[in-house]
Image (cartoon, helix red, strand yellow):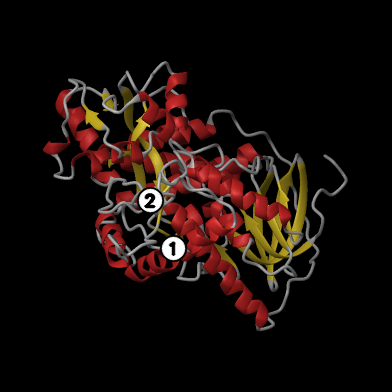
Amino acid sequence: MQSKRQLKKTIYDVLIVGSGVAGMYGALHFDDDTDVLLLSKYGKTVSNSNLAQGGVAAVLSFKDDSFEQHIEDTMIAGLRCNDIEAVDILVREGPNDVRRLIEWGVNFDKNENGELDLTLEGGHSRRRILHYKDSTGAEIVRGLLKKVEEKENIELAENAYLCDLTKVKSGFRADILINGSYESIFCSYCILCTGGIGRVYQYTTNPKTATGDGIRIAYELGARIKNLSYIQFHPTAFNSDDGERFLISESVRGEGAYLLNCNLERFMHRYDDRLELAPRDVVSKSIILESRRTGSNEFYLDIRHKSKEYLMERFPAIYAGCLKYGVDISKDLIPVFPCQHYLMGGIEVDLDSKTTVPRLYAAGECANTGVHGKNRLASNSLLEALVFSRRAAQDIKRYMANGTPKVTEHSFNVDYTGAPLPPGTADEIRSIMQRSYFVLPNPDKIRTGLQQAENILKRLKSAKFAKTIDYLEALSLATVATIILSEVENL
């Protein structure tokens, strides 16, 4: 264990956990005299945000579009289980946040006339998706990271894992494992921007960061968790044996790709009139039903009717990614199958991103704002991260302006020692989830799966394990799995 502290301070005004779009955009909305500590679990660009391909949805022109139409598309995709007030805020405030990104130097593709090149994705009735080729998230992260690194009041710590968050007077104590050393800091406010829960499944598009840590931490603090079983399974992940699967963006279908079954036939007409451009949950369920009908898990995307030049220009990352598996999308079919992609539920928050725990906020994928309902409309996630992380920062600034008390340092004692975690614990949880609830819940497996997840969680909590990242991630996964399966069982 290193003795020298790696964090600059022991007391901060605001702790933001997670360096994706929500974390960085929220951090940038604090004044220069506000001390902000921004934690990145691994490298500063390892996040779901950085992997986002399709784009960000926003109504920037009323020539062929409207706020009302974007709201309606969002409600339809969410099966009208959305919080309409949150959707209204998302759609009406989001365009200004997107314009701010452009002012800050984030690039979006333009057409030959120099106008924004808007694309179409499943569930959208209009072309309103701003994109940067097929790497929109990476471009937004690049632009935001540049701004963050210019701000002297924001301290960005990499390889910094939040182990525990404890309530103290006027704030929190945060225990952090940073580059192999344990350090503790105090903060007056905390915003959790820890992303999703993808690693609770065997197959996901999510990176290694997505283990539900923020949800576990909020749950342990007593925050309400809402609709955690609202999980989106993306219909077109590249069908490989990899645990982290390569996503074939919605926009590939938006630009005309056909979805084929094992007989190389289009089949979506059997399930939905919107065909390949139906919302993601509809397409995923249709693939599962079609696989049962045909007895095969072989499905393909076909975009060979587009020129190689167009595909390499419009989808360079997807083109190169498929080529690594020996698939030239200008000549070959793309093997696809659904896998876990996004979480619509999460830590319950209000319209200002406040949780039910005082001074604790959540934004981005770990939060349940209600904007997505039961199914996220494509490219609304980056917009949600922008709008609601900004609203969290603005709400905290209002409290600060009113002179709310600041946290002070408290004495404490933390024991991180213990036995090593038995190998295979996380894999056991993933196997349970894959059997019990993949796209469609398996009624015969839910009860058994829940009991198994509960037993793992009890074992992790009752035995004295060393507080390593492996242990704490397993604890997060077990907590998340138990909550999800409990919800599904009671549906």
Picture coordinates of residue 486, whole percent (x, y): 37, 51
- Residue in the picture at 54% in, 28% down: 424
Q: In which quarter of the image is residue 357?
A: bottom right
Element carrying mark 1: helix
The residue identified by callout 1 is 95
Q: Which of 451 and 54 is in front in this view?
A: 54
Q: In which quarter of the image is residue 280?
A: top left
Q: How crowded is mark 1: few (under 14 residues within 10 Å), some or many (20 or more)?
A: many
- Residue in the picture at 37% in, 61% down: 59
Question: Is 426 positioned to the left or the right of 439 in the image?
Answer: right
Q: Do the residues labelled 1 and 2 touch (CB within 8 Å)?
A: no
Q: Nearer the viewer, residue 71 or 462?
A: 71
The residue identified by callout 2 is 129
Picture coordinates of residue 246, whole percent (x, y): 44, 30
Can I make out residue 235 in this image? yes
Disc assigned to residue 271: none
Picture coordinates of residue 138, whole percent (x, y): 54, 42
